[in-house]
Amino acid sequence: MERAVRELWAESRDLLGLASPSPDETATASAVPRADLPPTPLAFLRDHVSPGRPLLISAAATRHWPAASLWPTASYLTDALRSTTVSLHLTPDGRADALAPHPQPEQRPSSSSSKCFASAHVRRVDFPTAVGLIRGSDPDAGLVAYAQQQDDCLRGEYAAVAGDVDAHVPWASEALGCLPEAVNLWIGNAHSVTSFHKDHYDNIYVVVSGEKHFLLLPPTEHHRLYVRDYPAARYVATGKDAEADHQLSLRLEMEEPHRMVPWSSVDPYPASPEEMAAQASSFPLYFDGPAPIRCTVRAGEMLYLPSMWFHHVSQSPGPNGLTIAVNYWYDMQFDIKYAYFNFLRSLEIDDSSSKVGDLEGDLEEKND
Amino acid sequence: MERAVRELWAESRDLLGLASPSPDETATASAVPRADLPPTPLAFLRDHVSPGRPLLISAAATRHWPAASLWPTASYLTDALRSTTVSLHLTPDGRADALAPHPQPEQRPSSSSSKCFASAHVRRVDFPTAVGLIRGSDPDAGLVAYAQQQDDCLRGEYAAVAGDVDAHVPWASEALGCLPEAVNLWIGNAHSVTSFHKDHYDNIYVVVSGEKHFLLLPPTEHHRLYVRDYPAARYVATGKDAEADHQLSLRLEMEEPHRMVPWSSVDPYPASPEEMAAQASSFPLYFDGPAPIRCTVRAGEMLYLPSMWFHHVSQSPGPNGLTIAVNYWYDMQFDIKYAYFNFLRSLEIDDSSSKVGDLEGDLEEKND
């Protein structure tokens, strides 16, 4: 079975025209197809949506957006959103919706993982306060802030500036035959990272300030992510200063009632050599397999990320100290590709050192 | 594994919106989506090509073709092609490119199948003679004729009448971004049957006279066809009358040099109760699984058959005694669906009574 699955990985990358980049992490070449101009709706459907092939479109795509010149400035957004309350996601280390050490290791069953799935502490603050907390994010001080809310927030919390960007992506809407289900805004800096996951949406991702760095794996490489069930936990604010935004202390607590979340076990950037060795030994299909496809999306550029692709996202801030991005989620088509994916996912691979046993559930959580 | 594959069958039919029709063979309802008018290129790509979903378009699609009124008449084609030489495929029973009893059972290795893959005897005759032989086809007399040549023959042998139909299907060409790779003409009657196979093309099939009856299985149901390697054989003309078209006698001979052809083992319409029992017992995944999707294409109608779909075709003649059809083959896109198909095909299923072991090759032969 493992041989057949490895052949599937190789053939799907080959057919998608996504040559494996060098495993050398310093390689800057991206294997994602790149275009100077947006495609026609027909070409987009035929060459990208139907085959499930990403596309990176150069800065020309968003040059007409008022946001392109306004949002990267130091003060436009804080002025425009001075009296707006937004949802700020707070973690000690910038890793929301990611695995973290179980906060009560003595209470977990001995057979279960030492990790849990940690969600951020979500705090409603005025936008200038949010930006101050994002700019002041410091993992060493145990507080990283990320303004994001995956609930169509650009047209909700951020409606005051929604007119600065296109309400939808015209060529994508025409191709897909619908308008976006959600348009989300993301404001963070280099301390926030989004762990490997996939979305049940066709995604158009636009960077307005700074850069986003994607690691991508096609859906055919599901087994490389070692998706397993983890108990859900959530950061909560603690201590006498729990009401003072700048002096928050966060503690991870298991969710009650108990809830399991299927999530990828793989951390592609382990913090220490010891953790790297543990990851490589536990998850050989990831670390010994073809290199993930790397793609940096710069300010003004658009990435089409097909539904069901696994992605890990890190970021660099622009001159204003912020990474700002907008993404458009379009309902995906549940078709024969989805049926094939579910079939693949139902199969177990025996590899030399690890069992992959995610036969239930899905990565229903929505991120980036 | 068999359970996972059965779930794949059910889910892919469900997602494609192709409810299983009643197993009652007399049911006339077709599960293939039907449209009164041709789709726009975008809707065709989005709703049919990309998901791999067939489409039947009503007679309006070809009403403007001169062929629609001319070809079903008794004499137009024989007049227009009076001096044209065409390729006529001759078999004793109407089954070309199909399994037949091995002609030299004593010479085959004891471990091999008792069947071979039989190709027609191809004879070059003038078109009026071809029509006479087709109309006079008689399995009881051991001679069935079918005018067909899958080499772009409408624009080759039949160029004199090619202008009676559209040179391509405009909305399909625009959607797929190319012109047809081949346009083929098929003239036969009820005695000719095409056995289960698939093509590496997106296929637009148009009936001009009579009706074509399709049994369809999506590519996800590969294992139900029991594709195995069979030794190739070919019908040859024999006897003292071998040069007289109307008194041909055909004999099946093994090809030299020896050649193996991967082909479906399943005959959905066995000739006798004994053969039916043998088929049902040998190929339970076909006979016990979901009913094939039935679709009758009537004169003037168009069927879009997605690439890689398995199809079995039988036919009924029109008032002129002939079934006449034109098909347009468009190059398919080899994408992630194709990689998934090859992965599925590489997996063996253990069922209760039979091993599926086609791990090599493909159904490279092209039919209907």
Image (spheres, coloured by chain):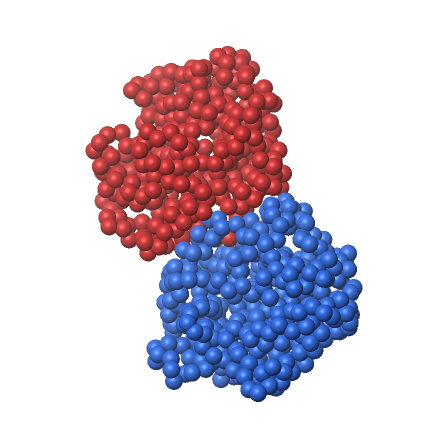
Chain colours: A blue, B red
Residue sitting at the far left: B274
In which image quadrant can residue A121 be found?
A: bottom right
Q: Which image quarter holds the N terminus of chain B?
A: bottom left
Return the residue nearer the eye: B39 or B62.
Answer: B39
Name the spot of residue B153 as percent of width and height, x first. Answer: 53, 28
Return the residue nearer the eye: B126 or B134.
Answer: B134
Name the spot of residue B77 as percent of width and height, x first. Answer: 52, 16
In which image quadrant can residue A135 be found?
A: bottom right
Query: In the rendered view, does B54 fall on the left or right side of B176?
Result: left
Q: Which image quarter holds the C terminus of chain B?
A: top left
Name the spot of residue A9 as percent of width and height, x first. Answer: 48, 60
Task: Say if residue A61 shows up in the picture.
Answer: yes
Name the spot of residue A239 as percent of width and height, x first. Answer: 55, 86
**Residue for point 42% across, 70% down:** A259
Q: How many marks?
A: 0
**Residue for point 27% across, 29% down:** B271
Up/down of A111 relative to B4, above or below: below
**Residue for point 61% across, 41% down:** B42
Task: Say if residue A277 shows up in the picture.
Answer: no
**Residue for point 21% across, 33% down:** B274
Return the residue nearer the eye: B315 or A242.
Answer: A242
Return the residue nearer the eye: A108 or A268.
Answer: A108
In which image quadrant can residue A292 be found?
A: bottom right
Up/down of B254 relative to A252, above or below: above
